[in-house]
């Protein structure tokens, strides 16, 4: 899974990136004109995997991973080469983490002279919409030219009608995400990688002095709600400091501040939700591993994640759900209690399934 961090200049994107990846990206260089993209990975914290690894005293524990891309701020209205390259990078991600400045700090000047979270969120959304509009217009021109040459009339006319509908919405400032599109339309739009169609998680970068609950924070939460986006308040500054500590230090610090959980875990969970992803586990003395799947995937698709041979030669999946596994304490105890299931190819995988695949090639 790849998540792109977007936001206006100096909203705290790189600070959030450092908090999430325990990275060391440069922060506070707004206006230096440098347009570098930071890339980093983070392991997905999952205490279910920890429990399995502990039970099997496994040699190797392999959590799922998320890749984060931190791009420089999108300056409203700019359409230079740098911006085009950033947009192209963003088209490759699965979801957007949209960072909006809520914190007020006179030592960090806001590019627009004042802090206004709703205005900023609108402004970034407009950038996404305009970037998509440019794609639609270019494609419509191309279609007109091809139709003029008498090419593939039926398919091109269908595509044209869909794109014209989308153009209308974008011109009204509406995200593609908010259009009522059927599965066929969504499928045919995939190649465009519209930014305003990507799942988006809104992060309010709140002040370290007022980590939750402030007025602008509530306004931004409202903005997200109006658009059915999930919203998280994060103090990027505090979290990026926590990311530099070892686990024990971090836990003590969080407790001191009365924060139950670091934002890394919260953000990752929100991304899993926004993308409708689930985890399943394979386990043993050699390796315990968490795998990521789109919700609704069947057992063969899960097997294919591990190896194409396992999918091809799939016989059945032996499954115990994690909660039962932990409750009964071992695989064999689950089996003895009749809580172990044999599932076929069409079985729809559930979050937390612990699986042994039987296959024959
Ligand atoms: N007080 C305070 N300052 C913050 C917070 N988050 C970020 N900053 C500061 O704001 C400035 C900009 O932060 P960055 O993380 O570099 O912002 P950015 O969005 O990556 O900026 P660009 O990449 O230049 O667009 C830095 O000086 C940060 O230290 C915060 O939660 N509180
Ligand atoms: Mg930055």
Image (spheres, grey):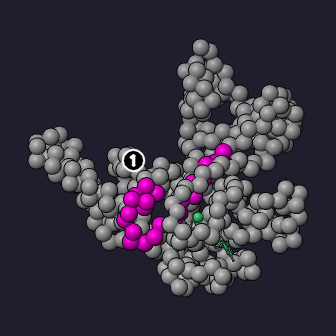
Placement of 248 over or under 57, stated as above or below: below
The residue shown at (57%, 76%) is 220
The residue shown at (66%, 39%) is 291
Closer to the camera, 320 or 275? 275
Placement of 31 over or under 196, stated as above or below: below
User: Per the image, is 332 magenta?
Assistant: no
Q: Is residue 302 left or right of residue 226?
A: right
Q: Position of residue 313 (x, y in %)?
A: 58, 18
Residue segment shown in magenta: 65-86
On the question of residue 205 being in view, the answer is: yes
Closer to the camera, 345 or 129? 129
In which of the image's four quarters is ligand 1 placed?
Answer: bottom right
Q: Is residue 140 left or right of residue 72?
A: left
Mark 1, Cα crowd under 10 Å, few <14 / some 14-19 / many 20+, is: few
Q: Position of residue 294 (x, y in %)?
A: 56, 44
| SS category of the residue bearing label 1 | helix
Closer to the camera, 182 or 116? 116
| Picture quarter with the C terminus | top right
């Amino acid at each position: 899974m790849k998540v792109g961090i977007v936001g206006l200049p100096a909203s705290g994107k790189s600070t959030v990136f450092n908090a999430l990846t325990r990275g060391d990206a440069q922060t506070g260089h707004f206006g230096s004109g440098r347009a570098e993209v930071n890339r980093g990975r983070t392991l997905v914290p999952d205490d279910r995997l920890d429990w399995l690894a502990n039970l099997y005293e496994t040699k190797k524990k392999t959590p799922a991973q998320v890749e984060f891309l931190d791009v420089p701020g999108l300056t409203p209205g700019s359409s230079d080469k740098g911006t085009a390259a950033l947009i192209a990078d963003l088209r490759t991600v699965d979801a957007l983490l949209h960072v909006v400045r809520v914190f007020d700090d006179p030592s960090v000047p806001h590019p627009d002279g004042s802090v206004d979270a709703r205005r900023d969120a609108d402004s970034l959304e407009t950038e996404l919409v305009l970037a998509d509009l440019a794609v639609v217009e270019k494609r419509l021109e191309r279609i007109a030219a091809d139709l003029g040459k008498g090419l593939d009339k039926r398919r091109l006319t269908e595509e044209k009608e869909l794109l014209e509908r989308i153009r209308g919405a974008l011109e009204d400032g509406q995200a593609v995400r908010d259009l009522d599109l059927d599965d066929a339309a969504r499928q045919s739009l995939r190649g465009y990688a519209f930014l305003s169609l990507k799942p988006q998680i809104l992060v309010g970068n709140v002040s370290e002095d007022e980590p939750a609950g402030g007025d602008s924070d509530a306004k931004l939460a409202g903005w997200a709600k109006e658009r059915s986006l999930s919203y998280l308040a994060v103090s990027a500054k505090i979290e990026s400091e926590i990311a530099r500590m070892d686990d024990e230090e971090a836990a003590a610090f969080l407790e001191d501040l009365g924060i139950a959980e670091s934002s890394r875990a919260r953000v990752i969970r929100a991304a899993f939700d926004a993308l409708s992803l689930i985890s399943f586990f394979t386990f043993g003395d050699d390796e315990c591993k968490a795998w990521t799947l789109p919700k609704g995937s069947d057992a063969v698709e899960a097997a294919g994640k591990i190896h194409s041979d396992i999918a091809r030669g799939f016989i059945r999946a032996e499954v115990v759900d994690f909660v039962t596994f932990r409750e009964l304490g071992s695989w064999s105890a689950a089996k003895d209690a009749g809580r172990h299931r044999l599932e076929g190819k069409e079985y729809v995988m559930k979050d937390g399934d612990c699986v042994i695949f039987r296959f024959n090639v």
